[in-house]
Image (spheres, rainbow, N blue to C red):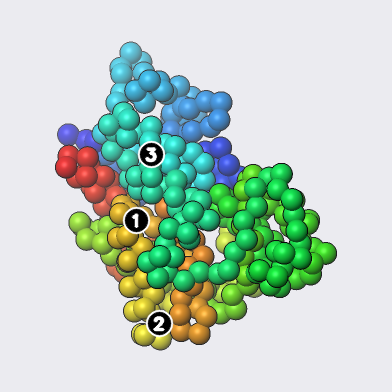
Amino acid sequence: MKKNIAIIMGGYSSEHDISIKSGTVVKKHLSTERFVCYPIHILAKEWYYLDDDQKKHPINKDDFSLLIKGENIKFHCVFNAIHGTPGEDGLMQAYFELLGIPQTSCGAYQAALTFNKRDLLSTLKPFGIQCAESYFLNLGDVIEPHEIITKVGLPCFVKANRAGSSFGISKVYKKEELQDAINKAFKEDNEILIESFLDGTEVSVGVITYNGKVTVLPMTEIVSENDFFDYEAKYEGKSQEITPARISPQREKRTADIARKIYGVLKMSGYTRSEFIFVGDHPYLLEVNTTPGLTEESILPQQANAAGISLSQLFESAITEALKNNIA
């Protein structure tokens, strides 16, 4: 019997449009012989299934079901393709956990933790995971530019603490630029993180559970044409994404071991994509993404392809693991 799969996409954040692209690619590559796929748009004011005729069918939030032509449709599994809130910060995960519906990303706690860059880095530091020096601000805090710069130095990065796709991020070279960068970050989130600049090779490391085994995918080296890996570099072709990364076997092994350790320490499931910058031969963690981009051009699919894993295999494996974990 075919499984009913809800592919959730959209979300409430600036990453809405990117998520729609990811969800559309997931639907395109999932087998029509094994699955009946329903693109579900999750918006702040409405949740709905968008059919092939572009007609909206509202979701019953009581049990996450659909009523189409008198038939009540329930889902065997949810494929989470929402970047940002509420799909990457634990809200949707908690909702589906309460309903007992399997979903492809990590659990609610892991999603909430990894979405909060400050809390994630604080959690991992005792396990020997190295990261940049940082300074944290809440909206309304007194801003002390001298104190900030004394701690993190210049240049530094100012970023939203809970946002993705480089929205709200600035690289600051001068003390006079700091306030404008802080204001920009606060437009995305009421918590911001200011981090010291790390000068070195940047790599992105995908870790997934594939065929029941935790698997570190071939790494991607990020070479931005801009000053850093910003939105333009990520989505508008202003960067090179070189897979596999041009790093030594020693660097590759060390980074793979750390990425695998993070996945294990946090008791992750589903996909993760971690970003590192090398300082000397030591990889410093920047962040962990739990619903990374899933278009044909996105980094995780590039890495899967380099490992000989097609998009169909990648997406179907996530569903298989989610169903297996639910049974357990």
Query: Label 3: which residue?
Result: 93
- Left or right? Give the position of 9 relative to 223: left
**Mark 2 or mark 1, which is nearer to you?**
1
Which percent across, then down, holds residue 271? 36, 55
Q: Is residue 84 above or below residue 219?
A: above
Q: Secondary structure at mark 1?
A: loop
Q: Is residue 80 above or below residue 171?
A: above
| Tag 3: amino acid | Gln
Q: Residue at x 49, y 50 (%)?
A: 115
What is the quadrant of the C terminus in the image? Answer: top left
Extreme right residue here? 176
Q: Few, some or many C-alpha atoms within 10 Å of disc 2 (few <14, some 14-19, many ≥20)?
A: some
Of callouts 2 and 3, the N-terminal one = 3
> Are the residues flagged by discs 2 and 3 in contact, CB closer than 8 Å?
no
Residue 226 falls in image quadrant: bottom right
Inter-mark Cα distance, 2 to 3? 34 Å
Q: Please name whichever residue, 20 or 325, is drawn nearer the observer in this view of the structure.
A: 325
Q: Residue at x 70, y 70 (%)?
A: 150
**Mark 1 or mark 3, which is nearer to you?**
1
> Are the residues flagged by discs 1 and 3 in contact, CB closer than 8 Å?
no
Which percent across, then down, holds residue 10? 51, 39
Q: Few, some or many C-alpha atoms within 10 Å of disc 3 (few <14, some 14-19, many ≥20)?
A: many
- Left or right? Give the position of 3 relative to 158: left
| Tag 2: amino acid | Arg
Inter-mark Cα distance, 1 to 3? 16 Å
Q: Is residue 48 above or below residue 119?
A: above
Query: Label 1: which residue?
Result: 266
Q: Residue at x 52, y 38 (%)?
A: 11
Residue 301 falls in image quadrant: bottom left
Which disc, if any, is residue 251? 2
Of callouts 2 and 1, the N-terminal one = 2
